[in-house]
Image (cartoon, rainbow, N blue to C red):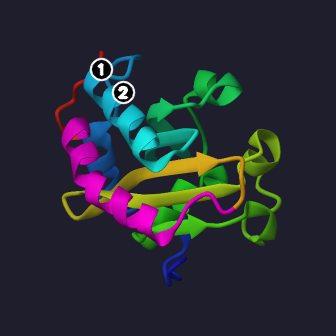
Amino acid sequence: MVVASSIPLTDVLTHPARVAAVGSVLPRGERTSAALQQFIDRVAEALGAPCAGVSLILTDAGILAATHGVGGWLAEAGGMPAEWAPCATVVRNDAPLLIDDTHDDPEHTMNPLVMITGVRSYAGVPLRLNGQPVGSLCVLSAEPGAFTDADLDTLTGLAPRAVELLQAGIYG
């Protein structure tokens, strides 16, 4: 369920209004707030997802504002290059994205994130602030076919709460 965009990735990601919106909700501390962490833990539980996240997409990087089940180098780095992040596709298209199996998706088969972490399924929806897509609320799994259109609907319903928590600036 990818919606094609006529605007190149770099144009959308560098749009001044979008960059300003992302900047207004960037984490100010090094820890995720307890409320945002509890929220993302509940998202993972509700969707039966081993991994979930709230990401913010900068011009060239994806920042993990809150995660559940993400460990290793990705948790330590706190993000990845934007070109690796399926969440950047969500932002670029300002539309939900469902990847049934990254191994069957030409856009992601050779994606370093997929190759390193073993992500096989992804579902994500845009997080919007001031009319601008700033990031994604997403779930990931090492199992193919883990998520459905119904999961996208659930994420869409939960996305406004993620934005509320980001806007509150409740970081440690």
Which residue is found at the position 50% from the left and 84% from the top?
Answer: 6
Residue 9's image quarter? bottom right
Return the residue nearer the eye: 80 or 2. 2
Evaluate whether residue 46 shows in this view. Answer: yes
Residue 162's image quarter? top left
Residue 37's image quarter? top left
The overriding secondary structure of the stretch rendered in magenta is helix
Residue 34 bears which disc, if any? Answer: 1
Q: Which x, y percent locates residue 100?
A: 66, 67
Q: Quadrant of the C terminus?
A: top left
Q: Which x, y percent locates residue 17?
A: 27, 59
**Type of amino acid under label 2:** Gln
How crowded pointer 1 is (Cα within 10 Å; few <14, some 14-19, many 20+) is rated as few
Count of all numbered marks drawn on residues in the image: 2
Q: Is residue 75 above or below residue 100?
A: above
Residue 162 bears which disc, if any? Answer: none
The reply to whether callout 1 and callout 2 are in contact (CB within 8 Å) is yes
Which residue is found at the position 47% from the left and 58% from the top?
Answer: 124
Q: Which residues are magenta?
A: 145-166
Label 2: element kind: helix
Which residue is found at the position 30% from the left and 20% from the top?
Answer: 34
The residue tagged 2 is 37
Evaluate whether residue 13 shows in this view. Answer: no
> 110 left or right of 56?
right
> 16 left or right of 103?
left
Label 1: element kind: helix
> 106 left or right of 6?
right
Q: Which x, y percent locates residue 101?
A: 72, 64
